[in-house]
Structures are given as structure tokens and as C-alpha cells.
């Protein structure tokens, strides 16, 4: 693909976002180096049994484990809806692959490896390379200081790039719920970042804080071995504790009111119980310890800003950008369209508004959130408008908008997950949308085994 200008671009991270960025930057004609601290691609999808020595993940000196996967994790979106648009996530009928529509984490990692192989991204990646610092030099270039993992701090390398794309993920720096009195409470605490298997919760009384997808999965899993599981969530109103249907040892409560020295936990509905473990399924912080923008880009109550459309800081655009900050989305196709946008802007094929216009847009967005009562920490929550956002960028890029089947499938899955949280991954009623997806996939030249897979559906 011909471009107006080819740039030297550094990509930080070789997870799904970094792979998409590398793919589309190179496709646009840019020269790309991807910095990855692990020995393979995949980012948060690389499972490890290892956990951090600090179970809450709040000690800044701890050795960080990047992944937050638990052993039994399966996707909460079907493979058709979560796939990159240009590289469909179809089942592969080989012995080690997981053909389920909602596959386990190992299959997602294999898919990302396949994607990297398909587009030759591996040759762009410097594995086991830690980025220590990224800053803008006096000449306007972006400097990246890196070193081989395990190497001495002084054994670093400084390199200059025209632009940097930050794709380091946001599932490794835990957010912890504030619990009055917990400092003197004698029990154990752990964040879901360090949860792998349920066995450590055998015969325990557990309070689990949170109500998102991981909290639902983990609460059911540990209930199979724990004596009691009490779920505390802001989304539950002040009323009597209710039992989760189908379980005789899981209760729903409003938020914790206080932890006590005698080992009890009290809830705002008056309920009180002796507890062994508090499990925080409370999400993550955006964290860029390597990024030095002299205060231009900040993380304030989990709002990364100021960013135009969650991607560009106006005064540093387009030379610094972020892929993958929004959540409550189908992430892979969003990474893809954000990456196309960044690549086209860097080459000069696509234009950005002026810094002043971008700043006004950001201020209007923040103001709208405030008027709607949306807390600052939910700035990057895209519930209800991810496809509108994606399609806006697609229009700027001259790309087709999101397929209707993908929008409908995402919605159908959300409704099914709410109605059947235990079985939605194995029972669904959107076969017509699956068929539409595979008919669409047949147009993709990079997709293999799709024709044979279509035979599994009634046509």
C-alpha cells in the first residue's frame, strides 16, 4: 500500500492490541519495532500458574505477573463476534485446538499466534525486552529506552522513533476496594489478578467483591469447594441477602460496610458474618510506568487523559497514541480499527483535527459524562456505544462499518449471559447470526477451513 510518508514507529506490547497495531502500521508502509517483555506474543492471553508474592498486587516493588487469567477461563463472547474482521476466528480441527464457540484461553492464544504468523508480525517483535522509559527528545523524536529481560539496568539501549503506540494492556495493576477497618481485620485478602484455581478456598467462608464477568465465573467456581460465598456489589441495593438461584451457598449483598478486628465483615444491609478470605474482583488500573510525558498525559481516577477519542493526546498527536483503552467492548475488532486510524494518520493519508478542536471535543465528552452522573473512573467504559465509536473511526479510515450480524450477536450474547449465566456459553439461539458470520468469513482470503465448517450449519 502506497503512503505519503513512512515513519519509524515503536509499539509497546505484543498482545492483541500490539499485534493489530504492528499489522496495520506495516501495511500502511511504516517501519515498526514491537517491544515485548515476554518470550511470545499474546499479552494477557499467556496463561501462567505463577502469581505475585503480594496477593493484592499493591506493592510497587513486587515482581509483576502480566497475565490475570485463571485456569478455567473461557471467553464471554463467541469467537465470531470477538475476532479481528480481517482474520476470522474459526475452529481448527486438530488435536490440541478448542473448537467450542466460547473457547478457553489457550485457544485465544493460539488464534493470536496464528494471526501473528499469517501477517509475519513475529519478525517485528523484540522478545524478552523490557521498556524502561519512553519520552520525547529535544529534537521532537520519541526516545525508547529498553533492555533485555534479566539484564542489568545499565545495559539499556536508547533508540529514536517518529512515533510511539502504547499497547501495554490494562489487566496487571489491580484496583482494590476501600473497606473501612480492613487494616485490623485478621483474615486474608487476594485480588482476582492472582486467582488461578479454586482449591485454596476449600472449606472457607469467602466474601467476593464485584459483579463483572470474572466475578460471576469465579464465585461459581469457588462455591464448589468453599463453605460459603458472599458476593458484595454496588449494583445490589440495600435489602435482605438473597441466594443465587441454583446454589445453596452463594448469597448476594450490597457493599461491605466495615471489617472488624474479630474477623467479621458487616454489610450495609445489617448482615454480619465471620469471614476467612476477601477476594477483590474489582478490576484494574491503567498503568504506564515507563511513559514520561512531563505531565501532559495523566491517569486520574482511572481516566487516561486528555485523549481524543481514547487514542490521541492533542498536544502530542499523532506521535503518541494508545490502542485498547476502552472496555466493555468486543476488543479485537476495536484494536483493529484504532490501529488502522493511527497508521493512516501517521502516513498523512488521514487527517486529524487541530489540537484546539480535539481539546474541545474531549472537554465536551467529559462534560457529557459528568452531566449523566458517570464517575470519572468509567471514562473508558463503552457500554452501549462501542459500535457507534468503531463506525465513526471506520468512516474516517474509509473502511466498511461493523457488520450487522456482529452487532446483533454481541447484543444477543449479552442478553443470553444475563438470562443464563451458568449455561450461556453452551446454549444459544442465534444460529442465524452464526450462519451470516460464516457466509461473511468466506470472503476472507486469509481464512482457512471455513467452507468445511459451514457444513455444520443447516443452510
Image (cartoon, grey):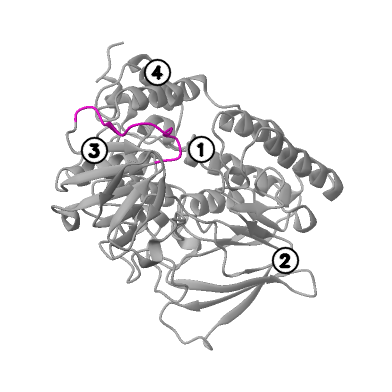
Residue contact at pointers 2 and 3, CB within 8 angstroms: no
In the foreground, 432 or 343 = 432
The residues bearing labels 4 and 3 have C-alpha atoms spaced at a distance of: 35 Å
| C-alpha distance separating marks 2 and 3 | 45 Å
Foreground label between 2 and 3: 3
Where does the C terminus fall, quadrant-wise? top left
Report which residue position mark 2 lands on: 295
Horizontally, is 331 left or right of 9 in the view? left
For label 4, the SS is helix
Real-space Cα separation, disc 3 to disc 1, in angstroms: 36 Å
Question: Which one is in front, 338 or 210?
Answer: 210
**Residue on which the image places disc 3:** 250
Q: Marks 4 and 2, Cα distance to the nearest angstrom? A: 46 Å
| Label 2: which secondary element | loop
Q: Residue at x 45, y 31 (%)?
A: 444
Of circles 4 and 3, the one toward us is 3
Q: Identify whether 243 is placed above or below 2.
A: above
Q: Which mark is residue 433?
A: 4
Q: Which residues are magenta?
A: 233-246
Label 1, secondary structure: give it: helix
Front one among 384 and 395: 384
Q: Position of residue 38 (x, y in %)?
A: 40, 66
Amino acid at each position: 500500500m502506497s503512503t505519503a510518508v513512512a515513519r519509524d514507529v515503536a509499539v509497546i506490547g505484543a498482545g492483541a492490541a500490539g499485534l493489530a497495531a504492528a499489522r496495520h502500521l506495516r501495511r500502511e508502509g511504516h517501519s515498526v519495532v514491537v517491544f515485548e517483555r515476554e518470550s511470545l506474543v499474546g499479552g494477557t492471553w499467556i496463561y501462567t500458574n505463577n502469581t505475585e508474592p503480594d496477593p493484592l498486587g499493591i506493592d510497587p516493588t513486587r515482581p509483576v505477573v502480566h497475565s490475570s487469567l485463571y485456569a478455567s477461563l473461557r471467553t464471554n463472547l463467541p469467537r465470531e463476534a470477538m475476532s479481528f474482521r480481517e482474520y476470522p476466528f474459526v475452529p481448527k480441527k486438530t488435536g490440541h485446538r478448542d473448537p467450542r464457540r466460547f473457547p478457553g484461553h489457550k485457544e485465544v492464544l493460539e488464534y493470536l499466534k496464528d494471526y501473528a504468523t499469517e501477517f509475519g508480525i513475529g519478525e517485528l517483535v523484540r522478545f524478552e525486552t523490557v521498556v524502561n522509559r519512553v519520552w520525547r527528545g529535544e529534537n521532537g523524536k520519541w526516545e525508547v529506552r529498553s533492555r533485555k529481560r534479566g539484564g542489568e539496568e545499565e545495559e539499556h539501549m536508547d533508540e529514536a522513533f517518529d512515533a510511539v503506540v502504547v499497547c501495554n494492556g490494562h489487566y496487571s495493576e489491580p484496583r482494590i476496594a476501600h473497606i473501612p477497618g480492613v487494616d485490623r481485620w485478621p483474615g486474608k485478602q487476594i485480588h482476582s489478578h492472582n486467582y488461578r484455581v479454586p482449591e485454596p478456598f476449600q472449606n472457607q467462608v469467602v466474601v467476593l467483591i464485584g459483579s463483572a464477568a470474572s466475578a460471576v465465573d469465579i464465585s461459581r467456581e469457588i462455591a464448589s469447594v468453599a463453605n460459603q460465598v458472599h458476593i458484595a456489589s454496588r449494583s445490589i441495593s440495600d435489602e435482605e441477602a438473597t441466594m443465587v438461584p441454583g446454589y445453596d451457598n452463594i448469597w448476594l449483598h450490597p457493599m461491605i460496610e466495615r471489617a472488624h478486628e474479630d474477623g467479621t465483615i458487616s454489610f450495609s444491609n445489617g448482615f454480619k458474618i465471620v469471614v476467612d478470605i476477601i477476594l477483590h474482583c474489582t478490576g484494574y488500573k491503567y498503568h504506564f510506568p515507563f511513559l514520561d510525558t512531563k505531565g501532559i498525559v495523566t491517569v486520574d481516577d482511572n481516566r487516561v487523559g486528555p485523549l481524543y477519542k481514547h487514542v490521541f493526546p492533542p498536544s502530542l498527536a499523532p506521535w503518541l497514541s494508545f490502542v485498547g483503552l476502552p472496555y466493555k467492548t468486543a476488543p479485537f475488532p476495536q484494536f483493529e480499527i484504532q490501529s488502522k486510524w493511527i497508521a493512516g494518520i501517521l502516513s498523512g493519508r488521514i487527517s486529524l483535527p487541530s489540537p484546539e478542536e480535539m481539546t474541545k471535543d474531549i472537554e465536551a465528552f467529559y462534560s457529557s459524562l459528568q452531566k449523566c452522573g458517570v464517575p470519572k473512573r468509567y471514562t473508558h467504559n463503552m457500554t452501549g456505544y462501542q459500535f457507534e465509536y468503531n463506525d465513526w473511526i471506520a468512516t474516517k479510515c474509509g473502511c466498511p462499518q461493523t457488520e450487522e450480524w456482529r452487532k446483533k450477536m454481541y447484543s444477543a450474547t449479552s442478553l443470553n449471559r444475563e438470562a443464563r449465566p451458568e449455561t450461556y456459553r453452551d446454549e444459544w439461539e442465534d444460529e442465524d447470526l452464526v450462519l451470516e458470520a460464516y457466509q461473511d468469513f468466506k470472503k476472507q482470503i486469509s481464512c482457512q477451513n471455513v467452507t468445511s465448517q459451514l457444513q455444520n450449519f443447516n443452510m
